[in-house]
Image (cartoon, rainbow, N blue to C red):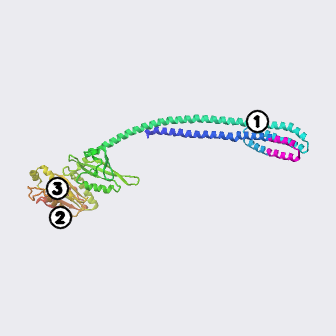
Amino acid sequence: MQPYRNLIFGFVFIISLMIGLGGFSLFHLNNISKDVENIYNHPFAVSNAGQSIQTLVFAMHRDMKDVVLAKTPEQVRATLEQVHTHEQKVLKEFDIIFERFLGNKSQIKQTYQTFIEWKNIRDEVANLALAGETEAAAIITKTRGAQHVDKLLGEVHEFVLFARKKADEFRSQSASNRDHSIYVVSTISFLTLIFSILIAFKVIARIQKAQKELGLREHLVDQNIMMATMDTEGVVLDASNALCRFLGTTKEEMIGKPSHFFDNSDNQNDLSEKIWRTIRTGKAWQGEICHIAPDGLLHWASSRVLPTLDENFKVTGFTNLLQDSTSKKLSITDKLTTLPNRRSFEEVLQREIKQAYRHNRPITLAILDVDFFKRYNDTYGHPQGDKALRMVADCILECLRRPTDFAFRIGGEEFAIVIADQDLQQSQVFLDSIREKVEALEIPHSKSDVSGFVTISIGAFWTRGSDNPDKALLYAEADKALYLAKNSRNQCVVQSASLLEDNAA
């Protein structure tokens, strides 16, 4: 969070400036709008009403002259009707002025009173005209009437001038608000631009730094993490250099070719089929693969195959992550036969004894020894002896079909098998079948006293899990059984606690 504090502060500052800019603009636009509204609703309305009154007063004064000049009472009355009509319009205009005039309302009241007083003069003229005294009516119209009209028009002209002056004030204020708004908006916009540019440079610098760090991380991943991407058919799309080094190949040789999940051992086909059954359902597979290097050395790796899914959860490819486990494997694996070694044997045997006790199931420990193996080495040489041991180990592995059966090389020509959940008779039959299959390999052994081929002797001890057997005791009893089997060689002897008791009796 710390590296991004300045950026966050900068963004908050810019957003604040933009909010301030928007708020200030709205405020001043509202003020300008009010100025325009004030001009329209007050000075213009009052000025227009005043000018209308002036026009109507002129019309009324002219009509009063027509009253004096009328020949008949009917003409007088008709003209007076026009005067009355104009009078009503003037009163309406005064209503507007009373409502919207922004100056001293007493001035309007005075003008209004002057207009009302004019009616007395008009009424006097009208009465004289109706009485036929047109000369007296004409004198009043030309003197008092004209003077009163001049006074009225002068008063109206004054508040019209006031309204125009007020309009100028509003216009000036509007211009001032506009200039102020332009200045402030320009200043805030300039500041926003400057800070935006600064932050943009900062962001670009951080992006460039992040790209460099990402490139470094990608390089570290490429050089240190064994990883490959594959399409839906398992064809390699890309691979890290770390994986290439582990496999002893190059990217160019790998890309575009089937991966087989990088296992090229004899178990390749079975393992690939098992992996495909899992990952095609969209589930990840995890296990161990074995790769035989060009120099013949075996390498193991913990492998995890992860399906890549699209938005519809359809598998679009796979990512294979591997971790070299060769050193760990070698620490528990016999290098010659690839069977688990004695260290692994000790761990597995202890674990299976606990499982047998927990689940109250029988357990059998068998020790296998290649008959006359020293003679075999002396006759055929140690390289051929190593080959024979590998063939025996492979034969033993082929016979182990259950996940609860384990085979080990515990020394020289000696092997061990742990069998779980088999009764005494089943263990006897199973071990005998291993012995027979080893002899059926027909590995020549001319110095053997029991056969022309390599054979093995097997000693085993069977016990119930409920007896809570001891590991050392189990091994000692199996070793005793092996001693009995080696009395005649190529034999399988399976002992149990009850058999030992019977023999003792």
Question: Is mark 3 in CB contact (under 8 Å) with mark 1?
Answer: no
Report the quarter where the C terminus lies. Answer: bottom left
First of labels 3, 2 by sequence position:
3
Q: What amino acid does circle 1 point to?
A: Glu
Measured in 3D between alpha carbons, the distance from the residue under mark 2 to the one under mark 1, in whole angstroms, is 140 Å
Quadrant of residue 315 within the rendered picture: bottom left
Q: What amino acid does circle 2 point to?
A: Leu
Is residue 18 visible in the rendered image? The answer is: yes
Look at the numbered disc 2 and give the secondary structure of its residue.
Answer: helix
Measured in 3D between alpha carbons, the distance from the residue under mark 3 to the one under mark 2, in whole angstroms, is 29 Å
Q: Residue at x 31, y 55 (%)?
A: 276
Q: Residue furthest front?
A: 71
Q: Residue at x 31, y 57 (%)?
A: 277
Left or right of residue 396, residue 213 in this image: right
Tell me the magenta residue range: 59-87
Report the quarter where the N terminus lies. Answer: top left
Left or right of residue 31, residue 209 in this image: left
Q: Which residue is mark 3?
A: 392
Q: Which mark is residue 158?
A: 1
Look at the numbered disc 3 and give the secondary structure of its residue.
Answer: helix
Look at the numbered disc 1 and give the secondary structure of its residue.
Answer: helix
Check if residue 68 falls in the magenta segment.
Answer: yes
Q: Which residue is mark 2?
A: 499
Measured in 3D between alpha carbons, the distance from the residue under mark 3 to the one under mark 1, in whole angstroms, is 129 Å
